[in-house]
Image: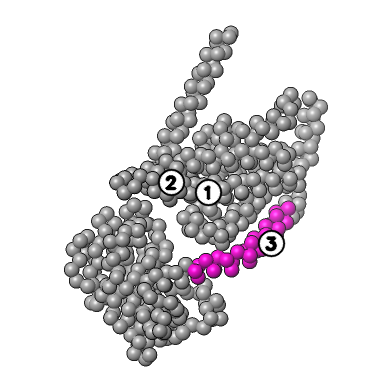
């Protein structure tokens, strides 16, 4: 790691969350919100942004307190930090956007147990400087929000014939109701995982071929 | 490199067993700070959240009672409806929301009817709703779902389907409200069900009947008295 200068290291930490280590498509973390609240594009976006706020704030705090928090109780301390931010989000959404709060319901409180967030604290923020932790958290959150929209947009378009509540196909379109029901979430997620892994495999094969040819 | 490792190893050794007091202290501080932040957020957002709720309720009342432009909150006390005072309302709000109804008046201060909130288990979860009741003609004149997790595309037709909503323009509550199959409504007290959402339709009818049975007598007494 010493050979890579800090700037490109930062960029790397930022980019990895978006594609190479995408929390949903590669690490398969945060499945609960990915399946439950992606029935409309708006819900996906709201959930992505709420998770972004919690992840970035907790990463900053955990990273700055990494030398203060005693090792044996670190997980408990992380949970307290995460839960505090989640509760703030919960109250803020209820106060300023009651409609979205009503739609997301219990899933806002469930951000506390999103493995993505605790995972980043334990494996990254608690071991790195604040700057890197922020880049990692923002990258991961963007990757998460991007994946949520990848699931949410097709589900809303097919399941309700609309996008962000704007009707797309007019009266004659018969919506595929199954897409906004829970099974639709599984279909869409499975389909996207398939595409993602197919690309990853193809890339690996090409890399191997290149190495073989050169060798 | 090996020196480095030695240092980190001895460091870990050192940090290995912080005393229990340190741990309790650290978590205590964390909990304390977190608590203060949360209380602050709660106090700041509470009035906004309550205002949102009151707003939603007000809109619903105006929707289920056509031409209504002011209302009074009534509560049940020993079987008699009495007006609830403003200051009392805030104190009681959390106790039992089910035990208040709203009397709606039109521009000439004439009583139009009552907006009555009620709830009933639906297909997925409790359905919370409010309906307008015209006590003179003994008819339900409006219906609005406040809370529901019914299946999108099927059960949610109880509030998205305009045809189903027309059931509640002038629905007689005597002898009791009855659910019939879609398109077979003949009498005033029958409700056209939604095909594919039988349980949700049944829940709505149950909600109306059960809630009416709670309030019926008190409302009749109140009407006679005024």
**Number of other residues with Cα within 10 Å of mark 3, as a class: few under 14, some 14 to 19, many 20 or more:** few
Residue position marked by numbered label 2 in the rendering? A163
Q: Which residues are magenta?
A: B26-55
Secondary structure under tag 2 reads: strand
Kindly identify the residue that appears in the image at 48 percent across and 26 percent down.
A199
* Residue B21 horizontal side relative to residue A77, left or right: right
Asked if marks 1 and 3 touch (Cβ < 8 Å), the reply is no
Residue position marked by numbered label 1 in the rendering? A47
Is residue B36 inside the magenta stretch? yes
* Residue B43 horizontal side relative to residue B104, left or right: right
> Is A197 or A45 nearer to us in this picture?
A45
> Is A49 or A129 nearer to us in this picture?
A49
Residue position marked by numbered label 3 in the rendering? B36
**Number of other residues with Cα within 10 Å of mark 2, as a class: few under 14, some 14 to 19, many 20 or more:** some
Nearest to viewer (mark 2 / mark 1): 2
Secondary structure under tag 3 reads: helix
Kindly identify the residue that appears in the image at 27 percent across and 67 percent down.
B167
Q: Disc 1: which chain?
A: A
Residue A71 location, quadrant = top right
Is residue A51 inside the magenta stretch? no
Mark 2 and mark 1 lie on one chain; the one further toward the N terminus is 1
**A162 to B75, vertically: above or below:** above
Query: Between marks 1 and 3, how big is the CA–CA gap?
Result: 26 Å
Q: Disc 3: which chain?
A: B
């Amino acid at each position: 790691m010493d050979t890579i200068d800090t700037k490109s290291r930062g960029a790397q930490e930022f980019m990895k969350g978006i594609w190479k280590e995408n929390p949903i498509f590669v690490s398969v973390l945060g499945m609960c919100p990915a399946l439950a609240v992606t029935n409309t594009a708006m819900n996906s976006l709201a959930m992505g942004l709420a998770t972004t706020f919690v992840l970035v704030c907790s990463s900053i705090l955990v990273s700055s307190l990494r030398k203060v928090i005693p090792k044996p109780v670190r997980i408990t301390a992380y949970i307290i930090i995460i839960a505090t931010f989640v509760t703030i989000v919960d109250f803020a959404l209820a106060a300023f956007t009651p409609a979205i709060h009503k739609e997301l319901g219990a899933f806002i409180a469930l951000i506390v147990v999103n493995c993505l967030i605790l995972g980043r604290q334990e494996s990254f923020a608690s071991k790195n400087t604040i700057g890197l932790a922020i880049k990692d958290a923002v990258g991961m959150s963007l990757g998460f929000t991007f994946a949520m929209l990848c699931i949410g947009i097709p589900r809303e378009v097919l399941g309700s014939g609309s996008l962000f509540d704007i009707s797309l196909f007019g009266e004659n379109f018969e919506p595929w109701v199954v897409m906004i029901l829970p099974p639709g979430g599984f279909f869409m997620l499975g389909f996207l995982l398939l595409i993602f892994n197919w690309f990853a495999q193809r890339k690996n094969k090409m890399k191997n071929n290149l190495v073989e040819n050169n060798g | 490199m090996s020196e480095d490792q030695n240092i980190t190893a001895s460091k870990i050794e050192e940090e290995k067993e912080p005393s229990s007091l340190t741990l309790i202290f650290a978590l205590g501080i964390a909990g304390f700070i977190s608590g203060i932040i949360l209380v602050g957020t709660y106090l700041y957002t509470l009035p906004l959240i309550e205002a949102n709720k009151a707003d939603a309720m007000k809109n619903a009342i105006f929707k289920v009672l056509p031409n209504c432009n002011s209302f009074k909150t009534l509560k049940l006390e020993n079987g008699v409806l009495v007006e609830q005072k403003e200051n009392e309302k805030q104190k009681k709000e959390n106790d039992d929301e089910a035990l208040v109804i709203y009397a709606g008046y039109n521009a000439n201060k004439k009583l139009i009817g009552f907006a009555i909130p009620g709830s009933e288990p639906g297909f997925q979860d409790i359905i919370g709703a409010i309906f307008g009741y015209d006590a003179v003609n003994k008819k339900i004149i409006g219906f609005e779902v406040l809370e529901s997790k019914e299946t999108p595309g099927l059960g949610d037709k109880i509030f998205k389907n305009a045809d189903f909503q027309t059931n509640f323009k002038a629905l007689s509550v005597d002898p009791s409200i009855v659910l019939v199959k879609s398109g077979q409504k003949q009498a005033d007290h029958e409700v056209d069900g939604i095909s594919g959402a039988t349980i949700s339709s049944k829940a709505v009818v149950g909600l109306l009947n059960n809630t009416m049975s709670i309030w019926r007598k008190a409302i009749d007494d109140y009407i006679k008295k005024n």
